Image (cartoon, helix red, strand yellow):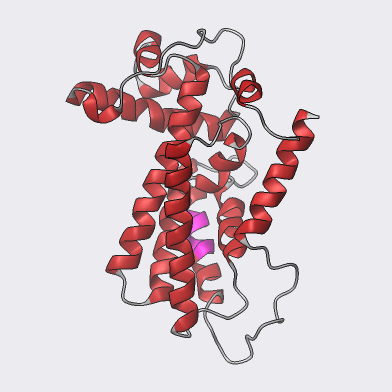
Amino acid sequence: MALKSTDVSQRGRRRGDHPPTVAPPAAHGLRADARRSRQQILAAARAVFVDRGTDAPLDEVARRAGVGNATLYRHFPDRQALLRAVMLEVFLEVGREARLALTQERNALHALGRYMHGALDSRIGTIMPALVGLVPLDQEITRARDDLTESVHRMLARAHADGSLRPDVVFGDIGLVLSRFSRPLPGPLPPELDIGLAHRHLDLVVDGLRALPGRTRGTLRGPALTLEDLRARSHGSESHELD
């Protein structure tokens, strides 16, 4: 079943949210203090949505951002506007990290590892699955998403071509590893310790991506999922949710 924009807007709103209004101007047109407030709100929203889900109270977002509710709604008139802004910001942020890794790292595997650590810090593996189905993929978001995936594909192609990456690693392995490591460990671990452990364990995984004798195609267990496989499964889950 196709995902309709009307379905998305209704799912993106919660009781107590302000009614949808015209979206605020782009961030680059704001004064410096307004840009800072906007960035504080986006950073807080990402953290709150990761911790408490996308239906968390927007009052909590404003509190963590250190701004009043009026300031939050001045930048993001409803929940849907905030969800869309978070998705776009994450795609743009991680896309920049991927491009920098490609241009600044000579070793292709080092570039891939650098990108994965940057993406882990962004919490993309946690926040994006939560936003899928809530935010329609308009032209701006689709372009940012595709720029990111193209950079990752280029990293993988370079690392396979120079022989540094084991031949059976595919696009889906990278994204799903990030998704697994982005989720906090169970138990009362301080956030700083949790993310530090995630980076340590990611180092172990990146080391396991190296091409070594005996690491040939077919030696990894489980399915090798491509980008197309992941998108097909994502679209299928959206349809089931709307049935």
In the picture shown, does residue 116 fall above or below 161?
above
Asked if residue 241 is among those painted magenta in the image, a careful observer would answer no
Residue at the (48%, 74%) spot, across then down: 157
Q: Is residue 197 magenta?
A: yes
Relative side of 138 to 129, left or right: left
Q: Residue at x 49, y 35 (%)?
A: 138
Image quadrant where residue 98 sits? bottom left
* Quarter that holds the C terminus: top right
Q: Quadrant of residue 6?
A: top right
Identify whether 92 is placed above or below 136. below
* 57 left or right, relative to 141: right
Relative vertical location of residue 205 with respect to residue 85 in this rendering, above or below? below
Q: Which of these two is toward me, 158 or 126?
A: 158
In which quadrant is the N terminus drawn? Answer: top right
Q: Position of residue 37 (x, y in %)?
A: 29, 23
**Left or right of residue 2, residue 182 in this image:** left
The magenta-colored residue range is 196-202
Q: Which residue lies furthest to the right in this view?
A: 243
One can see residue 119 in this view = no
The residue at the point 52 percent across, 63 percent down is 202
| Count of marks, rendered view | 0
Q: Position of residue 213 (x, y in %)?
A: 58, 92
Which residue is pictured at 57% across the width and 64% down the height? 171
Image coordinates of residue 80 in percent, x first then y, are 52, 22
In this orientation, which residue lies closer to the viewer: 64 or 175?
Answer: 175
Name the dominant secondary structure of the magenta segment. Answer: helix
Picture layout, residue 235 above or below residue 32: below
Q: In which quarter of the image is residue 140?
A: top left
